[in-house]
Each structure stands twice: as structure tokens, then as C-alpha cells.
Image (tube, rainbow, N blue to C red):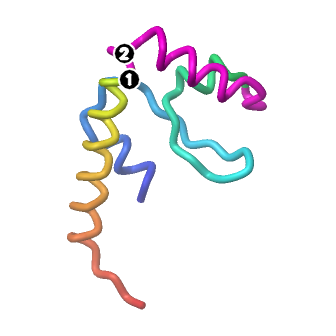
Amino acid sequence: MFEDAVHQADLRVDWTFTSTRNWMIVPTRLIEEAGRDTRYFNDSMAAINREDQDFCAATAEDLERILLTLEAADADASWEP
């Protein structure tokens, strides 16, 4: 459901589903800059925050779209406990 929502939403940046310690959705650029083992994740995130506010704004807009898409999918799904 989550991956489908990401693919259905009209997004400005590429996103990746990944698991290191936990499952997460993260901008692909951050994974590429942090390395697949995410060794430099925090450093990469801090550098992007300092140096590329346009990218940060785009990811914030994307997250809103992803959440709205998930909300719509949840409303359409027949949920059974």
C-alpha cells in the first residue's frame, strides 16, 4: 500500500523504501549521498538541510502528497480487524 501510494502521487523528487534498523521512505538522493549502509545518513541530511532548501521544500510537499494519497487509499479500502 505504501509503495503504491508513492508511485501514484505526483511527486517532485524520487523516493526509496529501505530498511536499515527500521523501514522508512526516504528521498533517493539522501540514500545515495549517505551510502547504502547509511553510514553518513545524519551528515548527509544536515548538509542537504544547510545547502539545498529547494530540495527540502520539494520533499516536504511530496510528503504531504504521499500522506494524502495514503489517506485516500485507506478511505477506499475495506478494512477488517
At label 1, which amino acid type do we have?
Cys
* Mark number displayed over residue 56: 1
Q: Which residue is mark 2?
A: 53
Please check the rendered image and state whether residue 39 is part of the magenta-colored stretch, yes or no: yes
At label 2, which amino acid type do we have?
Gln
* Mark number displayed over residue 9: none
In the displayed structure, does residue 77 sit left or right of residue 48?
A: left
Q: Which residues are magenta?
A: 36-55
Q: Residue at x 46, y 33 (%)?
A: 15
Q: Residue at x 21, y 70 (%)?
A: 76
Q: Is residue 31 above or below residue 62?
A: above
Q: CA distance from mark 2 to mark 1?
A: 5 Å
Q: Quadrant of residue 60?
A: top left
Given residues 18 and 53, the one toward you in this image is: 53
In the displayed structure, does residue 13 sit left or right of residue 10?
A: right
Please check the rendered image and state whether residue 31 is part of the magenta-colored stretch, yes or no: no
Q: Quadrant of residue 80?
A: bottom left
Q: Main secondary structure of the magenta part?
A: helix
Secondary structure category for the residue under label 1: helix
Q: Residues within 10 Å of mark 2 (few under 14, many from 20)?
A: few
Q: Residue at x 29, y 68 (%)?
A: 74
The reply to whether callout 2 and callout 1 are in contact (CB within 8 Å) is: yes
In the rendering, at what x and y percent does residue 47 appear? 56, 14
Farthest residue to the top: give it: 51
